[in-house]
Image: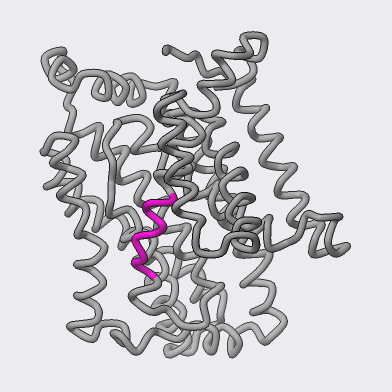
Amino acid sequence: MSVVVTIRHLVIILVVYLIILSLRVATEVVGSIGPITAQLLTLIAFYVALGQAFNIFLGMTGYVNFGYVAFMGLGMYGMATGIHRAMNAGFPGYIGLILGLFQAVVFSIILALVVGGIALRLGGAYFAIATISVNEGLRYLIEGLDIWEGSRGLPLSGPLISAFGHEGFSILSTVASDLGVFIIALLALIITFIFLNSRIGYALRAIREDENTAKVMGINATKYKLIAFSTSGVLGGLIGAMWSFKAATIYPPDAFNIQYTVEAIVVVMLGGAGTLLGPLVSGAIYASLKYFLAGILPGFQLLIFALLVLAIVILTPEGIVGALRYYIPRIRRFIA
């Protein structure tokens, strides 16, 4: 289904983002607002950002990157090592934060160019297989070569407390971290809008529909796929950098946990791949269901979500946004 994405769509979705952001800030200022807790809004912030960033590559190209969590893991290590370097050199804490964000971006770009430059020359299924072991390979590389403290874990809370004090660390690990991932989600949203309305978006959608025909038409498929892959990867690295504040110590099994990749796929498929609104809606739904199911049916969340995704793929392959467009024609012009 062809969808025209306009400024109106972008403004509507931005307003929804700002409402959720305001609720998150309000929980810190005036305490919990009814049943909406800071913990739930934190989960929403994370899954909206994760889905929005992952959507740029999967949604526009149709390619599935099973190694996506590798970008998040390197982002976490980029932030942690940046803070350590700044502290060891005697610089103030904010220099460490800037250096950490810079390293998260650089690590992600290097990984995207190395993996994407090789694997994106393969077809869809072969590309997915090629990316499966990326995160596990990086994990065992760090542990095996004892890089960044290896399996012992790289401490982060200690340097942050030394630099910002206990109160500053508390703010960083709660409000600042959540606002950071929401800002990254906003950035991903704006990039998605720009891509969808530019030559890049047209080329990516042509590749998604029929890559061989796109190549015959003169589109450099590898170039455009690498642009989407790198952009999505850098956003993943930034999410990892901001999310690292919630961990006292960065351990390889936690940083490269493949569950994040599975959850990103679920969020994108649930909302609607390649849409602006989809990751926002599905991120909020997924986070809410996970939050409440953890208390009602602990351990069964992923099984339930697997069945949910299976039902959505069968009943409405275009996700929640696609179903809304189909069953409620009156709101089609408000969603994209």
The foreground one among 306 and 270 is 306
The magenta stretch spans residue 171 = no
The relative height of residue 172 versus residue 121 in the rendered view (above or below) is: below
Which image quarter: residue 178? bottom right
**Is residue 154 shown left or right of residue 206?**
right
Residue 174 in the image: state x and y as whole percent.
66, 68
Question: Which corner quadrant holds the N terminus?
Answer: top left
Residue 328 place in picture, x, y as percent = 63, 13
Farthest residue, direction top: 329
Number of numbered labels in the structure image = 0
| Looking at the image, residue 329 lies above or below residue 211 | above
In reply to whether residue 262 is colored magenta, the answer given is yes
Residue 224 in percent (x, y) is at 25, 32
Residue at coordinates 85% horizontally, 64% vertically from top-left?
A: 31
| x 48%, y 47%: residue | 305
- The picture places residue 146, in percent across and down from the top left corner, at 23, 86
Name the main secondary structure of what is drawn in magenta: helix
Residue at the (63%, 57%) spot, across then down: 291
In the image, 62: left or right of 47? left
Residue placed at 54% from the left, 46% from the top? 185
The answer to which quarter of the image holds residue 325 is top right
Name the image quarter holding the C terminus.
top right
**Which residues, given as a range, are shown in magenta?**
255-263
When the figure is inspected, residue 75 is found, relative to residue 309, above or below; the finding is below
